[in-house]
Amino acid sequence: MRVPRFPFRRTVCGGLLLISAVTSLIAERVHADDARRSVTDERANSISAGMEASVAGLPQLYASVSRSIVRVETEKNDNRTGVIVSTDGHLLVGNGFGVVNGSGSIDVKVHLSDGRIVTATAAGWSTEWRLAVMKINEAGPWPAIEVGSTQELKAGEPCLVIGYLPRGDLQYDVSPAARWGFIDRSVPARWFTTTCFPGSFEYPAVVGMDGRLLGVDGGETGTQNHAIAVDVFVAHRDDLFAGKNLDWVRFPPAPDSVYRTGVGDHPELLRMRKTADVLGKAKPPTRMSDVQLSKVRQIAKQTTVRLVSKDQRTYDGEADARWSGVIVSEDGYILTCGHACQLPGDRFTIRLSDGRDVEGVALGSNPITDIGLVKITTPGPWPCAEIAASSTLKPGDPLVVAGYPAVDTQGHWTTERLPQIDVSAVGHPLYLLWYREFNNRMDYFGQGGMSGGGIFNEQGCYVAVCIGSGHMRSEVARLQWDDLQRIESIDTAIGLPHPLRKRFVATGKAVAQSIVELLVDSRPVGSGTIVDADGWILTKASVLDGKVSCRLPDQSVVVAEKRAESQAHDLALLKIDVGDLTAAEFSDKEPPAMTQLLCAVGPCPMLKPGIVSVETRAIPPEPRWKGGGTEETPDGVKLSRSIDLHLSGTKLQSDDIIVSINGHATPDDATLTQVLETNLGGYCTGDLVSVALRRKGEAMNVLTTLPPTTGMDYWRMYSRDTPRRSGFAAVFDIDIELRQREAGCPVIDVEGRIRGIAIASRGRDETRRGPTSVLPSHIVKRVTKQLIAETTSK
């Protein structure tokens, strides 16, 4: 087998596996059917037994490990979770480059669960593995967690995911949130995934049921959150504690690289140098000659391939998932990205630009580093690109970018044989900092499907994997080549229902007789709970922005009328002309304690078990829109196209002229602000208001939710969240992932008692959900009684 030549000025490390062993293993993968990853009944029972056995220990486990979990707060509001890993006060932070910031001189605040606030300074980091270390400045000892190992970690083992959730109101809980699940993918000593879905920008810790740290979340990759195995930290602990740039230690740039300029005596230590201070101001990019460009284009065309998965579907389920790769050896090894989430053994149809379709199989994949290796199983030889170092590139050097967009300009899945090839140049970064990626100039914009494609230098050599936001250096590919090539089997337990779901089947079926599916303008928007047999239904108020009806347990659909509302709790009381219904009974018990086992019950019935992840507390209102992002025009107050005004999830649009809100005229900016601050002073983001407006000259009225304040960090605000999600006097959180249209359903305990109503759900889309907030039953009972009395007394 031909080893890709990698002209570094250092020794090439590690040999490659024998071709006979590789071919044998590949053949075994290719001919295994889809059942190879299914969870057998025996294993499912084993996983269920393990989860059952660990339930009782959850309170003690949380109390023990939560002492080591901290919230790291920076001046830039880049808050995330840290975990204390030494009694001297070293903190491990997942995806911590933004916190450390490469400077080693910026102190951050660290909030402990016992209320103490201390400061910490940056130590070492690794962008290759998306982790960083900081050091608490004050004297210890500090409550360090015991560090474990994933060498023997198997899919199906229970785990606790624990961290601090950033929320849209920019406030934070005093104690970390807990989610309980099990490992569903494991590549020992490298990375793993869990059934728990962390909140955005949280980067929590993952702990085994023995209380030992298994890893830290590295963030979202593709459709998954991947955790970095603690073994990576342990292997490089000394260098990280010493404040080193682990990227420099593991894959240093070439001696003649611009990154060596002015680095001093210890280049591996952290330092941020402005590129302009070292290299001067940015210069116009260098252009290739026509002859050179033609040659490079030809190499890119011949070696760039489309990878069409046989085991994954596209996000909408309409076609086979597809992305790009580049052949880098004559015997058919293909470098690609890792964020497509392919697993070892996944099968591909590999499409070449010359019209050939061949078979291939995924070898190793590292979604943390975002790199993967695929092998063509059809005999070669194959056209291949020579791999060269990327560190010798300078800002302005010409590049060629090649890949296969997944869809054409009309949005259709494309079968185009020729890759898209664009000319670009190395960007002039603000800081000349050596790390795993480099960026091109902004004259090139990638498309979906281009990920995994190639970046070629002016000699036609492959220098990086295209990963969308940047390019993964060839140095990283070479460093991880041996690991990726080993075709390790990955232990999985994917697609298994919650192991404790059976506990709630009988009680859930009974409660489901008191639940209706809520429809607004005939579309499902949530659940309602029957609170009186004469047709009184309690539901979430802020979703009722149209004609309301209910689908009853017998599947009949009836019109509903809103009779009363509690704005403070986002609850509405509906009335339907149906009697003899089964009314729900709410528990008189105090709100459930931390880690108590519960289950959300919906129509059908829907049964989703989980635990209390944050105990009952107030969630203050997140900042609400008070008139910003507008401009006065002769026609009235117009909503501007400012990026600071976030209208996603509302019925408002840019350029709308606001005539009145809830009947209060808004002829100018000052009056609009007064109405929002005074007349709507008690309203929260997500509450419904009636807005009279003119859109493109046409007068109309819309019932819409109020947007957040202008200037909010939009990544905290998602259109897939329930409309109202803050401003509650008392709610507890559960780790049950409820879709937007599943909010409003009751939550029961193992005895079948209703402990509250799920009032808010957050998440990045309909399938990837974050925390769910629940109104405790004692509040629901009180409010229900008040609303019924208010309505019947009229």
Image: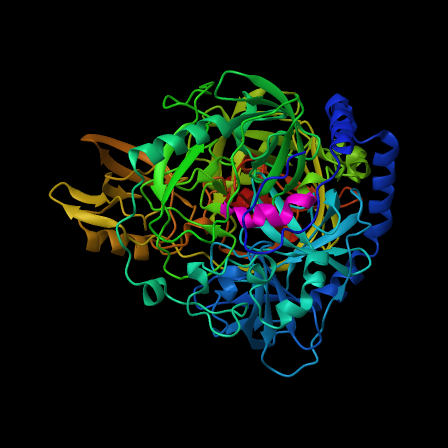
Is 246 placed above or below 15 here? below
Q: Position of residue 428 (x, y in %)?
A: 35, 54
Q: Is residue 684 left or right of residue 245?
A: left
Q: Position of residue 652 (x, y in %)?
A: 32, 38
Q: Position of residue 670 (x, y in %)?
A: 20, 55
Q: Is residue 619 left or right of residue 70?
A: left
| Nearer to the camera, 639 or 420 | 420
| Nearer to the camera, 244 or 765 | 244
Q: Is residue 323 left or right of residue 597?
A: left
Is 475 in the magenta? Answer: yes
Residue 268 seen in this snapshot: yes
Q: Residue visible at 67% across and 54% down?
A: 613
Is 644 placed above or below 357 here? below
Q: Residue visible at 24% across and 45% down?
A: 640
Is 371 placed above or below 137 here? above
Residue sticking out furthest to the left: 634
Residue sticking out furthest to the top: 355
Magenta span: predominant SS is helix
| Nearer to the camera, 166 or 315 | 315
Task: Report the number of numbered marks.
Answer: 0
Residue 771 seen in this snapshot: no
Residue sticking out furthest to the bottom: 139
Q: Position of residue 445 (x, y in %)?
A: 37, 38
Q: Which residues are magenta?
A: 472-483
Quarter of the image for the N terminus: give it. Answer: top right
Is 479 in the magenta? Answer: yes
Task: Please tell me in which quadrant of the rendered image residue 580 appears.
Answer: top right
Question: How are the residues colored?
Answer: rainbow
